[in-house]
Amino acid sequence: MKNVRKIFTAIIEYDPEKKQYVGMVPDVPGVHTVGSSLEEVRRNLKEVLELVLEEAGDEINLQEFVALEMIEVET
């Protein structure tokens, strides 16, 4: 069986209190990680994503990324 290349959207934020990057792939439940640099969190996300997809096989229920919105509120 030939491998199919897929592209997923990742969200990466910086946590200044813990001084680390936090990453997640919203389309795939369970794919989240941390890293001390952007490069590390990207590598970790790719590794976790590959593991989750491999483990789940055809059983995974992928969600579909729709949009990233900026919401303004007064505080």
Image (cartoon, rainbow, N blue to C red):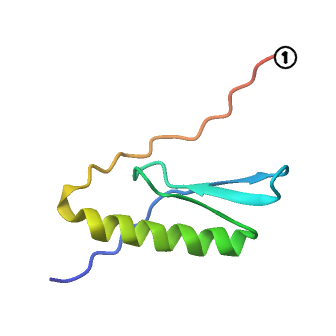
Q: Is residue 4 above or below residue 19?
A: below
Query: Looking at the image, is 4 positioned above or below residue 17?
Result: below
Q: Is residue 61 left or right of residue 12?
A: left
Disc 1 residue type? Thr
13 left or right of 56? right
Report whether 42 appears left or right of 48: right
Residue at position x 28%, y 75% in the image: 4
Local SS, label 1: loop
Q: Is residue 12 or residue 9 the one in the foreground?
A: 12
**Snapshot quadrant of residue 53:** bottom left
The residue to which callout 1 is attached is 75
Point 38% across, 71% down: residue: 51
Q: Above or below — where is 50 with respect to 12?
A: below
Judge left or right: residue 64 versus residue 9.
Answer: left
Residue displayed at 69% across by 75% down? 39
In x, y percent, where is residue 60?
26, 55
Residue 19 position within the rendered picture, expressed as x and y whole percent measured from the top left: 83, 58
Q: Nearer the viewer, residue 10 or 68?
A: 10
Q: Position of residue 72 (x, y in %)?
A: 74, 24
Whole-percent x, y for residue 70 in the image: 68, 33
Placement of the C terminus among the 4 image quadrants: top right
Residue drawn at (61%, 35%) of the image:
69
